[in-house]
Image (cartoon, rainbow, N blue to C red):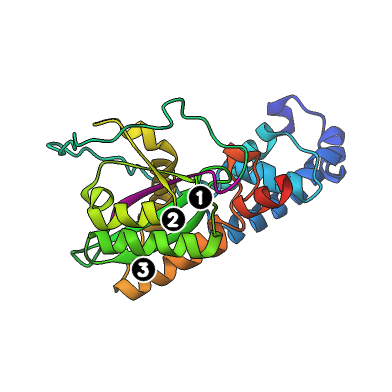
């Protein structure tokens, strides 16, 4: 074999006895740390967030190196395609305007909240997740799950957020033009708490891009490829994901790879 490869026998045996290079040894240690991070977040991180998490543990390493090692280890983020088309969606052209047309993110908490509702299915039954996010830190400050999409669900979510955050009057809440947000009872609650209501332009889901992004992340990292047996099981999983993982732990690229709670503490 040495003759066919043009290698001397002494050179071959020297190579066999040679110790691993320092870089190979470092790669082995990094793979252990990468696996710890990947397992801790249940496979939800791709190489950018794994890289940031490894850096937070004191390792000085490039993003490309982490990506290469993850590829060698066969580690892929738990992300699936979750976009879908909704033909024939009704456009609500009632009064109301977009008060944040510039799309700016506030520099302090409890200045602008965004809210939306999404559909989740459990054993052929739809469940509706209503959520409110503080746009400053991307923190989910209130959420509710129900089998009916009504104003009562969104009112309950708003009440939870207000009770938890106690915002001053002048807060802006941005939503789409769904009937659950346009109802008289919901509008009455907004006025009672001194909250201004901003609405996405008809047919412009990008006006509420941060909530759309959150729902996309939630479905990719938790919902897809998971078979929930009951609404209670889904609710428990949502609580664990939103309250314990997303708000407290998940590294968010839009706020300097901090978790929402950590970001609020840093900028306070």
Viewer-nearest of labels 3 and 2?
A: 2
Q: Is residue 223 left or right of residue 150?
A: right
Query: Which image quarter is the N terminus in?
Result: top right
Q: Is residue 30 left or right of residue 193?
A: right
Real-space CA distance between mark 3 and mark 1, rounded to the nearest whole angstrom: 34 Å
Q: Are marks 1 and 2 in contact (CB under 8 Å)?
A: yes
Viewer-nearest of labels 3 and 1?
A: 1
Q: Is residue 117 magenta?
A: yes
Task: Give the image location of residue 57, x and y in percent.
Answer: 77, 51
Give the residue at mark 2.
193
Q: Nearer the viewer, residue 236 or 67?
A: 236
Which callout, 3 or 1, points at the residue further toward the start of the chain? 1
Estimate how packed mark 3 is, as few (under 14), some (14 to 19) or many (20 or more) residues with alpha carbons within 10 Å.
Answer: many
Task: Give the image location of residue 226, x and y in percent.
Answer: 36, 62
Give the residue at mark 1.
169
Give the residue at mark 3.
234
């Amino acid at each position: 074999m040495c003759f066919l490869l043009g290698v001397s026998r002494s050179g071959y045996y020297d190579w066999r006895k040679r110790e691993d290079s320092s870089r190979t040894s470092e790669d082995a240690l990094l793979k252990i740390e990468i696996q710890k991070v990947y397992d801790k977040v249940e496979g939800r991180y791709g190489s950018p967030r794994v890289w940031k998490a490894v850096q937070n543990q004191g390792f000085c390493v490039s993003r490309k190196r982490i990506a290469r090692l993850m590829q060698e280890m066969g580690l892929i983020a738990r992300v699936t395609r979750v976009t879908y088309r909704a033909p024939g969606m009704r456009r609500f052209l009632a009064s109301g305007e977009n008060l944040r047309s510039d799309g700016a993110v506030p520099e302090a908490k409890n200045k602008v909240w965004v809210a939306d509702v999404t559909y989740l299915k459990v054993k052929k039954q739809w469940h509706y997740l209503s959520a409110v996010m503080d746009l400053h830190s991307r923190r989910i400050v209130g959420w509710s799950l129900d089998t009916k999409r009504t104003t009562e669900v969104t009112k309950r979510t708003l009440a939870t957020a207000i009770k938890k955050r106690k915002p001053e009057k002048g807060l802006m809440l941005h939503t789409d033009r769904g009937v659950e947000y346009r109802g008289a009872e919901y509008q009455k609650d907004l006025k009672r708490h001194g909250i201004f209501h901003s609405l996405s332009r008809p047919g412009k889901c990008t006006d509420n891009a941060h909530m759309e992004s959150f729902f996309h992340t939630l479905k990719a990292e938790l919902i897809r490829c998971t078979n929930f047996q009951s609404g209670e099981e889904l609710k428990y999983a949502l609580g664990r994901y939103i309250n314990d993982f997303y708000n407290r732990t998940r590294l968010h690229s839009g706020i300097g790879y901090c978790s929402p709670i950590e970001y609020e503490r840093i900028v306070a």
